[in-house]
Amino acid sequence: MADTPKPLLIKRYASRRLYNTETSDYVTLDDIGGFIRDGREVQIIDLKSGDDLTRQYLLQIIAEHESRGESVLPVGVLNDLVRSYMSGNVSVVPQFLQASFDMLRDGQSKMVENMTSINPLAKMPGMTNMTSMPGMEAMQKQQEAFLKAMTGGWGSTGMGSTTPTPEPEAAEPAEDLDAIKKQLADLQDKLSKLK
């Protein structure tokens, strides 16, 4: 059983500077956002008090992206989050959000896996070395860019130099996405009824 890697430890000094303990240099919030986009977990600790400041800094990264017009969270979701903090009751919102992101991540992984496993050109006679086909490298780069854009950089596409551009198949990934959207809408409806 593989061990999960330890989070990247970032120490915050009294001067509020952030120090990467792996590379022994100072980092910014953008750097931390880059680590997270690359799949790393981070833990930010106050050097003097030992307090875990990870949540505070992750929320700050999200707030900065939102303020730059990179809106991800709809206003209704933000309102619900504020209500869940202000209600004083035990909220199901954290568990709902975690389950939603887990479903989204799993769905994206399955979509990437399905897209990279489709290899219709390999079944054609005489197609043993597809990288020698004119334009194949450009098509592969376009496919990788498309997959990265669609998945937001989550997970690895696992694409090698001989993977061709897949043909669109049946609407199976779209059906999965529709099912996930419906489940999220149902859960959101149930949450609003709980209030």
Image (tube, grey):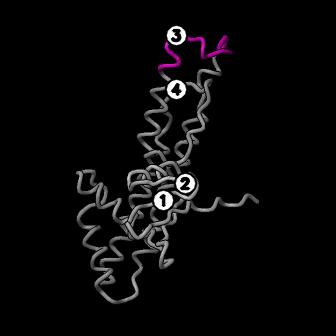
Q: Residues within 10 Å of mark 4 (few under 14, many from 20)?
A: many
Task: Give the CA distance from mark 2 to mark 4.
Answer: 41 Å
- Amino acid tagged 1: Tyr
Front residue of 75/39: it is 39
Task: Give the CA distance from mark 2 to mark 1.
Answer: 7 Å
**Span colored in magenta:** 125-138
Q: Residues within 10 Å of mark 3 (few under 14, many from 20)?
A: few
Disc 2, disc 1: CB below 8 Å?
yes
- Amino acid tagged 3: Pro
Residue, disc 3: 134
- Closer to the eye: label 1 or 3: 1
Disc 2, disc 4: CB below 8 Å?
no
- Amino acid tagged 4: Thr
Residue 89 position (above or below residue 8): below
Residue, disc 1: 19
Q: Residues within 10 Å of mark 1 (few under 14, many from 20)?
A: many
Mark nearer the N terminus (4 vs 3): 3
Disc 2, disc 3: CB below 8 Å?
no
- Closer to the eye: label 2 or 3: 2
Residue, disc 2: 24
- Please state the horizontal and vertical placement of residue 56, each as a whole percent of the image: 38, 70
Q: What element carries label 2?
A: loop
- Closer to the eye: label 2 or 4: 2
Disc 1, disc 3: CB below 8 Å?
no
Front residue of 117/91: it is 91
Task: Give the CA distance from mark 1 to mark 3.
Answer: 48 Å
Residue found farthest to the front: 15
- Please state the horizontal and vertical placement of residue 60, each as a whole percent of the image: 33, 64
Residue, disc 4: 165
